[in-house]
Image (cartoon, coloured by chain):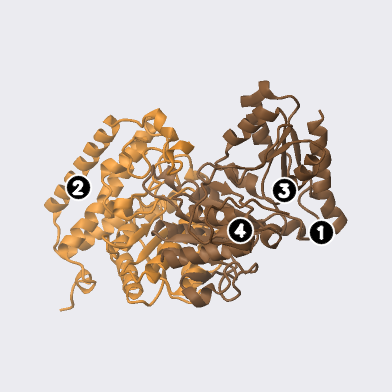
Chain colours: A orange, B brown
Amino acid sequence: MSKDKHTELGLKEEDLVEMYRCMVLARLCDERQWAFNRQGKAPFVIPVSGHEGAQVGSAWAFERSKDIFLPYYRDMALVLVCGFTPKDIFLGLFGKADDPSSGGRQMPAHWGSKARNIITGSSPIATQVLHAAGIAYAKKIKREDAVVGTWFGEGGTSEGDWHGAMNFAGIHKLPLIFVCENNQYAISVHESMQVAGHVHKRAKGYGFPGFVGDGNDVLQSYKLTKEAVDRARAGEGPSLIELRTYRFYAHTSDDDDRTYRSKEEVEQWRRKDPIGRFERYLRSVGIVDDAHIEELRAVAREAVIQGAKEAQAAEFPDPASALDNVYADTELS
Amino acid sequence: MTTLASATSTDTTEMNIVQAVHDTLRDEMRRDDRVLVLGEDVGARGGVFRATHGFLDEFGSERVLDTPLDECLIAGVAIGLALDDMLPVAEMQFADFIFPAFNQIVSEAARIRYRSNGDFEVPMVIRAPWGGGVHGALYHSQSIEAFFAHVPGLKVVVPSTPYDIKGMLIEAIEDRDPVLFLEHKKTYRLIKGEVPAERYTVPLGRAAVRTEGDDATVVAYGLMHHFCVEAAGRLHGEGIGVEVIDLRSIYPLDMDTVLTSVRKTGKAMIVHEDTKFLGVGGEVAAQIAEEAFDDLDAPVVRVAGPHIPAMPFSPTLEHRYLPDVDRLEVALRKLAEY
């Protein structure tokens, strides 16, 4: 009898349950933040739904204690893997003082946390990919056993910063994994108008391997990324992983995706939901049953409700603090 | 042309600006493994101005990094290095080529401390040769300080004596924030001065009074400050006392030194190569008007570049663009006699 898929990948049952939990948490946080947005309590939302498999699968391939993460704004499930809590997510959503990413300075979903090895990000696309290259170069010359991961959409692969980082990573064989969450739309612009050829094939031009996989399959996302991380840790250099997926909602709460894609297309992709798919796998190998799933979901739902409640009750930043942290020298602002 | 050496040590060496850059960088790299240089041609070529000559042999290719021809990459990778506890000194081969890196410098380096509420910082230096008078035409002569000094989170400094180069470069490397370190390329070999062997720092954001006088204040930096010192010397012979202030740093801007002088002389002129409109002179003049209006005996004067896209090549055209000592002398006399 052949081994289970996850056993072949070296994943234990508790890994799978934890991965599933992160995916469900992300989905429930997303649904809750949309509700807050529609109630007029959250001015801006960046949804994650649909990307949970690609994010959790790829993030799980890294060692959270020593590896470095440079995500982009869609990566809520990824930062949950790295130790963000639902309360942290909602502190950011409401712009509260204790928002771990920015203390309420940035829009929601601009992740960062030194304690969790998540490098602060911005809104301009793919700028973080060059920072990842710089960090990976530092890790390499310091002979540190750390691998750097950076995430972006297929739109990000059009930026010069992205090509510069790919080139630099290839030249120096950096311990750097490029993960593209290809959801086929950069706001409204379809992949066919964004990408000449295929994202993963671009790696070849920069002298390192590129792979494509089904981002809605969390185990495949994990497998491709884990192999890349292992190669990087062994000194074999960078990889590009393209994970094909789809976002279920508009780009942000300020976008209307009905203007550029059909309801039928969205429905078709919703049937490939990465969470439902993973759930079916977990049932098929006997790791979870109805009762277990119900319990996991109930615990996650409670964590989201509680986290949101605490974040709502939390303090806003002191207005005077708007002038803090411009320079190390506090006299200068 | 002379420069003031404010050294107290007896062990000094006379050197030019580019030598001071070179020796200071070399000494800081010897002193701290975290310091590294990156840029186009900094390795095998030792820099197009020879600022990193011999570094590749001494420090190796990991810390003397020849980058691809991609200024955006140079800035972005330097940010990553700084985020991982290195002390990168990035070189833009010419300030004119910094614009592809504008987004990385302005949207990223300048904002990382602020946007993370102090969780992250970017202690990096970007060196860039700037300024005209070298037949560099439109793309090898530019002044870029106003673009960047406008951005909170950045420091922009313009040292132009060998003594200041050493003290301020050490200070810039030690600074916990991104510093744009602008070296006027015409001064590289033109300006010589005594540099102490010992390690010392010159604070970023402290102007220097180069000549004292009671009749007019002139505020300048870079090559122009040397021209102003020369023009002031000529007027001194006529009994006109001009106080020349070398700003040395655009941000932080040392208005205390400027205002103290203006309150004494009652007259102020600001000189820079950069275009007059929305240039540094506008800011200095506005702050003088806000803080010392009652002490002024004459309108504030700006002598600066004309409103043309950049410095042209032909010697007659270049000369038309760039203020020289004769022109500054005339302008200063007119102000003193107002």
Mark 3: secondary structure: helix
Check whether the beta carbons of the residues at disc 1 and disc 2 lie within 8 A of each other. Answer: no
Of labels 4 and 1, earlier in sequence is: 4
| Residue in front for this viewpoint, B115 or A25 | B115
* Distance in Å between CA atoms under marks 3 and 1: 19 Å
Residue at image point 51% right, 78% down: B57
Q: Is residue A171 visible?
A: yes
Quarter of image, res A133:
bottom left
**Which x, y percent locates residue B328?**
80, 43
The disc labelled 2 sits on which kind of residue?
A: Arg
- Determine the secondary structure under disc 1: loop
Q: Amino acid at mark 3?
A: Met
Residue B288 vs A279, above or below: the answer is above
- Name the residue carrying label 2: A297
Give the amino acid type for the residue marked by disc 4 in the picture.
Glu
The chain letter under disc 2 is A
Q: Nearer the viewer, residue A316 or B4?
A: B4
